[in-house]
C-alpha cells in the first residue's frame, strides 16, 4: 500500500518577465489501486504539477510538501524519485539521439531494480509489452523517441510504465494526439497494468474521452493552479456537458 | 544537382549557418616544399586565425634535423617500411605542403619513412605505427604511404607521450585500392602536434581517413584529398574530445579535380571544461572538370560545460553546375538538460544518463568508423574523459 500525498503545493517558474506562480496550493492524495483523473483547461498548471512531482529543475517549490509513504519526495533527486516508485508519462516525451530504445529500457530497469534484469525474461517481457501496445519490434533498435509520431511516443511512454512497474504513475495527457484506435491500445495498456498490479494512477487530461476506457475513482477539476472541485466519475460527465466555464467565470 | 543545407536551429554559431565561399579560392593557396615560401604565421591569416600560433614557434622555425619520436611498428607480411631521402620523398608526394609547419616537416625531417603496401595485397591485419614523444627537441616527421593498385589495407598511426611535433604525411591510394588510415592522438596534455595529411585517390579507389583526437595541448590537423582519376571515393571521419586547456583544430580540404568522385566528411566533437576549444573548417572545392561528383560534409559539436567554445565552418566552392550533390550541415549545441531529465526520470543516475547522451551523440560516427579496435579504444577513452570530468558516480 503506497500513498502519494501532495499538500498545499506552491510552485513558481522563472519567466522572461519575472517569477510567476503557477501552482497555488495543490492538495491531492493518490493511493495504491486508485485512479485519479485531473482535468483542467489549457494552462491551468497540470503539467507543472506533474513535472514538480517528478523533479524537473525548471520548477521551484516555494512551499508545501510531497511525500511518498511519508518520505520527502522533494528532497530526492529526479532519479531517486523514479527509484522510489514514481513514474511520469510525459506530455511531450524527449528525443535522445543515438540511444536505442532497448538500451534505454534495460538501463532504466537496471537502475530501478538495482540489478540487471535476467536477460531471457527481460527480452520476452519487452517483446510481449510491445506486441500488446502494437509497437513493431523494430522500435527496439530505434533511437529513443527520435522520429516517432505523436502516438508512437505515447505508446512508448506506456511501454515504459508497463516494464518499470512503478507504484504511482502520473500520465500527463497521454490521450492527446491519439486517434481512437491508438487511444484504445494505450488505455488497454494502462488497464493491464492496473489489473496486474496495485498501481496508483494520476491521469491528467483535457478531455473526457479517455475516461470512457479508463474508469477513474476520483475526478478533480484543476483550475488556475489548484484543485477547484473533487468528486466521483459523475463529475467528469458534468464537465463533458458543461465544460470549464462554470469554474472560470466563478473566479472573476 | 541538389544543394542541401541542414543547419539545426538551436545554438548554432552564426558563422556556421551558411557555407561561405571564401574570399580567395582554396585553389590559389600556396603549396611549396620550401618553408621560405610561407611567412611565419602571425595569427591574423585566415587559415591561422583560430590557432594559438604563439605556442608553435619552435615548429615554424628554421634549423637542422631535430629530435625524434620513439617508433614501434607492427607490419603484416608484405608491407615494407624503409627510410628514403628527402629527394625521393619529394618525387613521391602527391602535392607539396600547404603551410609553413608542413613545409618545415618536409625540410627538417632529414628524409622520410616510406610505408609500402604492394599491389593487390589483401591485408587482414592493420599495419600499426606507434609514435611516442619523449620530450626534448621539436620533432619533424615525414611519412610517405603508398597503397598499390587493388590493394586493401588499414594503417593505424598512434601518437602518445610528450612532443612538439610537425608532420607531413603523403598518401597515395592507387587505382582500385581500398585504404583506411587511422590517426590516433593520445598525447599527454603538454604536447603540440601539427600535421598535413595529403592524399591522392586513384581511379575507383576508396580512401578512408579517420582522425581520433583526445590528447594534446594544441593539435591542428589538415586532412586533404585530391583525385588522380575519376570515380574515387573519399571518406574523412573525425572524433575529438576537448578538455579544459586543449585546442583541437581539424581542417579538411577535398579538392574535387576529377569527375564522378565522391566525398563524405563527418567530424563530431565534444567539449568539456571552461577553456576547451575546438575548431573545424571543412573546405570543398568542386572544379569545373569535376562533373557528376557528390559531396557532403557535416560537423557537430556537443558543448558539455559553460565557457567551452567550438567553431565550425564549412566552405563550399562550386565551379560546375553538373554535379550529383553537394551539401553540408554544421551545428554546435549545448548538452540538452531535457534529455538528462528524461533519462533520470526513468531512474537512471546522472552520471549514467550523461554517459548515455554523450555516447549517443557519437553513436553514428562510431558505426561509420567500423574498425573494431579503434571503436573500443575510442569508447574507453570517452568513458575516461567523462569519468575524470564529471567525477565517477558515488
Ligand atoms: N517557462 C515558462 N515561462 C512562462 N510561463 C510558463 C513557463 N512554464 C510554464 N508556464 C506557464 O504556466 C502555466 C501552466 O502551464 P502548464 O504546462 O502546467 O499547463 P497545463 O495545464 O499542462 O496546460 P496544457 O493543457 O496546455 O498542457 C501556463 O500558463 C504556462 O504558460
Ligand atoms: Mg500540460
Image: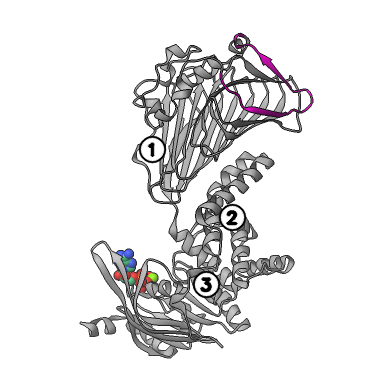
Quadrant containing the C terminus of chain A is bottom left
Q: Position of residue B38 (x, y in %)?
A: 42, 16
**Residue B271 point in image, percent of width and height:** 46, 46
The residue that appears at 56% across and 88% down in the rendered structure is A1
Residue A59, visible in the rendered structure: yes
Image: B115 above or below B182: above
Tell me the subunit letter for badge 1: B
**Residue that sits furthest to the right in the current view:** B77
Q: Can residue B154 be found in the magenta stretch?
A: no
In the rendered structure, are the residues bearing label 3 and label 1 in contact, judged by CB atoms less than 8 Å apart? no
Q: From which residue to which does the magenta span run?
A: B66-87
Q: Which residue is mark 3?
A: A80
**Chain containing mark 3:** A
How many numbered badges does the structure rendering display? 3
Q: Which residue is mark 2?
A: A142
Q: Nearer the viewer, mark 1 or mark 2?
A: 1
Q: Is residue B38 above or below residue A111?
A: above
Mark 1 within 8 Å of ligand 1, using the beta carbon: no
Q: Nearer the viewer, residue B382 or A213?
A: B382
- Mark linked to residue B16: 1
Of residue A186 and residue B378, the one placed in the foreground of this image is B378
Distance (Cα) linking label 2 and label 3: 27 Å
Amino acid at each position: 500500500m503506497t500513498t502519494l500525498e501532495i499538500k498545499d503545493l506552491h510552485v513558481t517558474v522563472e519567466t522572461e518577465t519575472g517569477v510567476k506562480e503557477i501552482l497555488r496550493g495543490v492538495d491531492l492524495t493518490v493511493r495504491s489501486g486508485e485512479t485519479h483523473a485531473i482535468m483542467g483547461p489549457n494552462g491551468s498548471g497540470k503539467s507543472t504539477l506533474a513535472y514538480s512531482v517528478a523533479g524537473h529543475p525548471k520548477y521551484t517549490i516555494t512551499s508545501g510538501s510531497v511525500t511518498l509513504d511519508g518520505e520527502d519526495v522533494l528532497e530526492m533527486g529526479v532519479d531517486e524519485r523514479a527509484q522510489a516508485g514514481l513514474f511520469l508519462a510525459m506530455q511531450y516525451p524527449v528525443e535522445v539521439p543515438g540511444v536505442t530504445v532497448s538500451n534505454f529500457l534495460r538501463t532504466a530497469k537496471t537502475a530501478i531494480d538495482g540489478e540487471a534484469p535476467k536477460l531471457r525474461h527481460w527480452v520476452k517481457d519487452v517483446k510481449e509489452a510491445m506486441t500488446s501496445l502494437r509497437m513493431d519490434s523494430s522500435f527496439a533498435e530505434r533511437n529513443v523517441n527520435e522520429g516517432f509520431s505523436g502516438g508512437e511516443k505515447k505508446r512508448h511512454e506506456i511501454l515504459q510504465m508497463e516494464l518499470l512497474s512503478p507504484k504511482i504513475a502520473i500520465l500527463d495527457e497521454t490521450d492527446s494526439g491519439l486517434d481512437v484506435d491508438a487511444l484504445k491500445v494505450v488505455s488497454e495498456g494502462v488497464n493491464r497494468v492496473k489489473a496486474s498490479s496495485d498501481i496508483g494512477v494520476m491521469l491528467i487530461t483535457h478531455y473526457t474521452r479517455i475516461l470512457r476506457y479508463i474508469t477513474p475513482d476520483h475526478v478533480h477539476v484543476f483550475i488556475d493552479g489548484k484543485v477547484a472541485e473533487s468528486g466521483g466519475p459523475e463529475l467528469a460527465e458534468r464537465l463533458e456537458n458543461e465544460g470549464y466555464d462554470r469554474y472560470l467565470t466563478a473566479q472573476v | 544537382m541538389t544543394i542541401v543545407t541542414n543547419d539545426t536551429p538551436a545554438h548554432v554559431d552564426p558563422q556556421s549557418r551558411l557555407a561561405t565561399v571564401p574570399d580567395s579560392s582554396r585553389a590559389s593557396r600556396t603549396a611549396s616544399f620550401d618553408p621560405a615560401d610561407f611567412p611565419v604565421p602571425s595569427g591574423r591569416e585566415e587559415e591561422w586565425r583560430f590557432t594559438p600560433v604563439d605556442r608553435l614557434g619552435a615548429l615554424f622555425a628554421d634549423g637542422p634535423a631535430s629530435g625524434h619520436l620513439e617508433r614501434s611498428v607492427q607490419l603484416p607480411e608484405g608491407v615494407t617500411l624503409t627510410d628514403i631521402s628527402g629527394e625521393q620523398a619529394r618525387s613521391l608526394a602527391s602535392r607539396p605542403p600547404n603551410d609553413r609547419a608542413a613545409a618545415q616537416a618536409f625540410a627538417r625531417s632529414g628524409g622520410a619513412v616510406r610505408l609500402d603496401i604492394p599491389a593487390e595485397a589483401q591485408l587482414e591485419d592493420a599495419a600499426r605505427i606507434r609514435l611516442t614523444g619523449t620530450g626534448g627537441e621539436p620533432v619533424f616527421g615525414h611519412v610517405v604511404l603508398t597503397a598499390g593498385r587493388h590493394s586493401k589495407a588499414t594503417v593505424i598511426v598512434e601518437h602518445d607521450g610528450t612532443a612538439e611535433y610537425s608532420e607531413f604525411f603523403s598518401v597515395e591510394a592507387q587505382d582500385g585500392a581500398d585504404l583506411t588510415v587511422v590517426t590516433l592522438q593520445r598525447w599527454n596534455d603538454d604536447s603540440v602536434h601539427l600535421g598535413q595529411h595529403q592524399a591522392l585517390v586513384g581511379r575507383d579507389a576508396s580512401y578512408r581517413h579517420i582522425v581520433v583526437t583526445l590528447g594534446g595541448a594544441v593539435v591542428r590537423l589538415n586532412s586533404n584529398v585530391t583525385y588522380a582519376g575519376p570515380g574515387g571515393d573519399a571518406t574523412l571521419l573525425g572524433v575529438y574530445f576537448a578538455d579544459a586547456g586543449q585546442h583541437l583544430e581539424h581542417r579538411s580540404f577535398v579538392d574535387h579535380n576529377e569527375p564522378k568522385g565522391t566525398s563524405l566528411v563527418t567530424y563530431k566533437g565534444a567539449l568539456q571544461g571552461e577553456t576547451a576549444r575546438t575548431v573545424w573548417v571543412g573546405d570543398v572545392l568542386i572544379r569545373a572538370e569535376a562533373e557528376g561528383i557528390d559531396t557532403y560534409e557535416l560537423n557537430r559539436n556537443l558543448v558539455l560545460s559553460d565557457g567551452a567554445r567550438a567553431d565550425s565552418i564549412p566552405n563550399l566552392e562550386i565551379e560546375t553546375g553538373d554535379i550529383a550533390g553537394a551539401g553540408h550541415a554544421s551545428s554546435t549545441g549545448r548538452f540538452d538538460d531535457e534529455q538528462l531529465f528524461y533519462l533520470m526520470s526513468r531512474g537512471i543516475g546522472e552520471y549514467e544518463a550523461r554517459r548515455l547522451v554523450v555516447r549517443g551523440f557519437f553513436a553514428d560516427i562510431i558505426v561509420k568508423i567500423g574498425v573494431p579496435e579503434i571503436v573500443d579504444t575510442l569508447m574507453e577513452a570517452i568513458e575516461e574523459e567523462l569519468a575524470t570530468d564529471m567525477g565517477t558516480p558515488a
